[in-house]
Image (cartoon, rainbow, N blue to C red):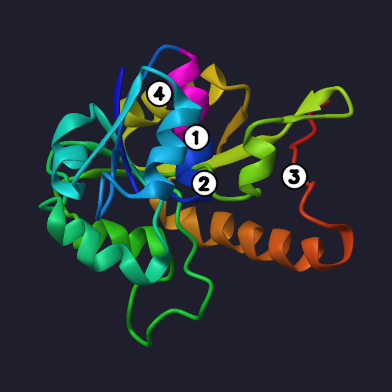
Amino acid sequence: MRIGILGAGNIAGALGKRWAANGHDVLFGVRDPQSYTVQLVLNGCGPNAQAGTMHEAGAYGDVVVLAVPWSAVPDVLTQTGGCPDKILVDCTNRMGPPTPGGPASGSEQVAKLAPQARVIKAFNTLGAESIAHLEFSGTNASTFMCGDDAAAKAVVRQLGEDIGFDVVDVGPLATASLVESLAQLWVQISHSLGRDIAFRLLRR
């Protein structure tokens, strides 16, 4: 599958490296494709990864992954034209409170900024270091996914399972605020337990 990743930071690079290693074709969208830090990311991903502009990454991917700091989201989505008709996986975390009268979650705000995209929330509730090592005491970390498009969810589920996630569907995009609160909880817990932690849904 062709995956456009908007950003090349810690989460973007970790996901891109895992997907490239699993045979997917990855294009990172960045401000400067020739920068030293971007080249380091590419060197870690192997031959299935390349870099281009945000617009190029948005056009390239069958799936487009949004993995930039929250403050950059509006500008990045403008550069991509809102990723029309694309599956847009939102990995961002809006850590502050919602704007009064605005959407309850960051993902719902992303959907307003990219109204023609098929927005799915996923891959936002653990540290980038753990994406390379998803196994904890014999079981793999969960990622919690939500969105309104069943076909898009099926694709994102497969991408998550390709790299070892236990993928948990928690419902429509309206539940994204609950998923984002898990990211805030992860940050809080990491202050005392460190970053080598993750959530797992236990089933009986």
Q: CA distance from mark 3 to mark 1?
A: 16 Å
Find the distance from the CA under tag 2 to the CA under tag 3.
Answer: 14 Å
Mark 1: amino acid: Leu
Reading the image, the residue beneath label 1 is 15
Task: Determine which of the numbered discs, if any, sits on residue 11 in the image.
Answer: 2
Provide the secondary structure element on which disc 3 rests. loop
Rendered location of residue 60, percent (x, y): 17, 31
Marks 3 and 1, the one that precedes in the sequence: 1
- Residue at 19 percent of width and 55 percent of height: 114
Check residue 61 for magenta coloring: no
Q: Residue at 21% of width from left, 66% of height from top?
A: 75
Residue behind mark 4: 154
Task: Identify residue for label 3.
Answer: 198
Instruction: From the image, state whether disc 4 or disc 3 is nearer to you.
Output: 3
N-terminal of the pair, mark 2 or mark 3, is 2
Q: Is residue 102 above or below residue 106?
A: below
Residue 114 image label = none
Work out how far the residue at label 2 is from the one at label 1, CA to CA, in angstroms.
6 Å
